[in-house]
Amino acid sequence: MADIGTQQFPRTKRFDMEERKTMVFNAKDRTIGVDKDALAGQAADKAAAKADNVQFDRYHDKLANFFDQKLVMLEQERREINAHLNRNLVDFRKEYQKKEARREYDLSDPASLKTSLPARVGDEDGRNSVSGAQKFEGEDLLAGERRKVQLAQQAAWCAIQTAEKSALKEHDRAAEAAYAELVTQQTEYQHAIAAAQKEARSELQRAIAAENAWLADEKRAREAYEKSSVAAANLAEEANVASSDMLNENPSLAINYMAPHTRVRADHWKGMSQDEIYGIAETQAVQREELKARKLAEKEADNRYVTSAENVRRTLEMKALQVEEFKQEQRAAVFNTIKAQRSEKAARDVTMKGTFGSNTITPEFFSQFGTSAR
């Protein structure tokens, strides 16, 4: 028989109980706990895996150290290259970008006062200006002559300006006189035009008044002639109307001679006679009475239908109330039944507890363990 727990032991195999007892209760034949060989194999596998992991970690540590040293060397080389470039830049600036060659060097030159010229080299220095405060009256030998020339120039300028102002005033006076003469002539012309317009307006008004008087006389004559003509036409029209069968609507003209009692002439018929109108009115009165009676009958039928529907509704409502009362009675009966069953169960539980007592564990319960192969 194969050992329990090994690969040769099938889980679904049936075995002899007595043989199993011999194997289980015999301390020499059975194996207590787990399989030691399997555990030893697992421990060896774990140790080998651990050694492999240690070897792998050492390899990666060496590789990381190598790359770290390589990066340090590259960083040191980069710094040396940057330092070399900076030194070359400084040397280039010292050689080709000196301060003396800069465009703004004269603004910050410490020796500018030593190398610059004085404010005045001599009397003929072209840098001397009027506002430079370099030449004074006591030093200028030509100051008096220059002042005479300046005064003469000033007097000439004043004379020229005086002559220009006088000429401008004379021109202004001439312009004002010409403008006054023009205004006087325009005023006289306006007065003459206004007088001529007034005379022409008066003449036009007199002509209009004469024309209006002639038109009024003509209008009165025309109105008198039209009035007499209208009166004559009205008299002729009244005579024609009085003698015209068509305008007087003579009913005899509308009679159809082929069927005098049933048909009329459509081109001469002017309306119904009084008898026909009275007959139609009587027919309409009869129709109104019939319509009134029919509506009354329909109203009575509607009332009967409403009454019947109300009776049906009340009957259905009464039936629904009866059904609801029956349901309430059924629910009350079910509730009472459940309540009675609960009371019976409580009484039965009390009786069972008093009769059979409680379930107490005795020592015989523990002594049965270990007496069977199960």
Image (tube, rainbow, N blue to C red):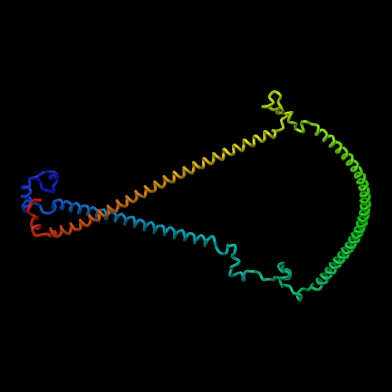
| Closer to us: 217 or 287 | 287
The residue located at (56%, 64%) in the rendering is 99
The residue located at (20%, 56%) in the rendering is 344
| Residue 196: x %, y % from top left | 93, 52
| Closer to us: 188 or 175 | 188
| Closer to us: 200 or 300 | 300
| Residue 128: x %, y % from top left | 72, 69
- Which quadrant holds the N terminus? top left
| Residue 337: x %, y % from top left | 25, 53
Tell me where residue 122 sits by quadrant.
Answer: bottom right
Question: Is residue 280 shown left or right of residue 37?
Answer: right
| Closer to us: 36 or 31 | 31
Question: Is residue 326 shown left or right of residue 245?
Answer: left
Tell me where residue 284 sits by quadrant.
Answer: top right
How many numbered tags mark residues here? 0
Q: Which residue lies furthest to the top in this view?
A: 258
| Residue 357: x %, y % from top left | 13, 60
